[in-house]
Image (cartoon, grey):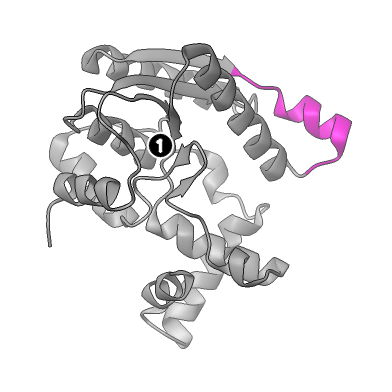
Amino acid sequence: MLSLEPRIRKSIDDHRLISAGQSVVIGVSGGPDSICLMHLLCRLDKNLRLTCVYVDHNLRPDESLRESKLVESQCHQLKVDFVAVSVDVPAEVSATGESTEACGRRLRYAALEKVRRSRQADIIAVGHTADDQVEEVLLRLIRGSGLKGLSGMRPKNGRLIRPLLEVSRQDILAYLGSNEHDFCHDSTNESDRFLRNRIRMELLPLLEKRFNPSIRNTLLKTSK
């Protein structure tokens, strides 16, 4: 198998995600996926103008400060622009009655789009992986979806791109480890309050153990 960098270059070219000289806003949470995306795009050899954006959802004050500083520090080392923005998810949830997950996602993408417009950037890149795709397919199946929904996330959706969508989190962690890139851990990823977390921590391990050891690859093939 190709190492991660040439695989990402091939995926970007195959799906026509990024053209040379474009301006790209990268959503960087400080977690492994987005940190990996940031470093890979910096090494892409397309003369890109990059802006990394950290969005504070006001849900984890202690962790958010640490994440923001880590992303800012790595951006400084990489010589790319860093922007930190804040959205008040708790207040918005109280006002709208949305779930925390849905509200956070909506406000996060709105914040990224606002930065894209202010920077006159061409596209927004986010760090969804093949593991996220598997979880998304199961999530949509559980909630109810037609065929289009069961295809999961797309590598490109308008101005939004997902260059890591065909890469496993295991490969991402291996890349970060071999290159000694630090990242943060979001404690909410371990909470069973959220359906996506229960799919990742409970349902997928059960399906792998009791029904199909290759369920992740099966679901990825189904989505395609």
State the image coordinates of residue 210 (x, y, percent, origin top left): 47, 86
Q: Is residue 37 magenta?
A: no
Which element carries disc 1, helix, strand or loop?
loop
User: Seen in the image, is 90 located left or right of residue 177?
Assistant: right
Three-letter code for the amino acid on which mark 1 is drawn: Gly
Residue at 71%, 70% in the rendered image: 144
* Closest to the observer, 20 or 56: 20
Which part of the image, by quadrant, shows the C terminus? bottom left
Dominant SS type (magenta) = helix
Instruction: Relative to 98, say whether 124 is above or below.
Output: above
Instruction: Relative to 61, say whether 43 is above or below.
Output: below
State the image coordinates of residue 204 (x, y, percent, origin top left): 49, 71
Residue 172 at least partly seen: no
Residue at 61%, 64% in the rendered image: 149
Residue at 80%, 34% in the rendered image: 93
State the image coordinates of residue 192 (x, y, percent, origin top left): 63, 55
User: Seen in the image, is 224 located left or right of residue 44?
Assistant: right
Which residue bears the numbered disc 1? Answer: 31
* Closest to the observer, 101 or 80: 80
State the image coordinates of residue 115 (x, y, percent, origin top left): 53, 18
Looking at the rendering, which quadrant does residue 40 occupy?
top left
Instruction: Relative to 53, say whether 181 is above or below.
Output: below
Residue 16 at least partly seen: yes
Using a 10 Å C-alpha cutoff, classify the residue at mark 1 as few (fewer than 14 neighbours), some (14 to 19) or many (20 or more): some
Looking at the rendering, which quadrant does residue 216 occupy?
bottom left
What residue occupies the far bottom of the structure in this picture? 211
Q: Which residues are magenta?
A: 86-98
Total residue callouts: 1
Which part of the image, by quadrant, shows the N terminus? bottom left
Instruction: Relative to 219, say whether 46 is above or below.
Output: above
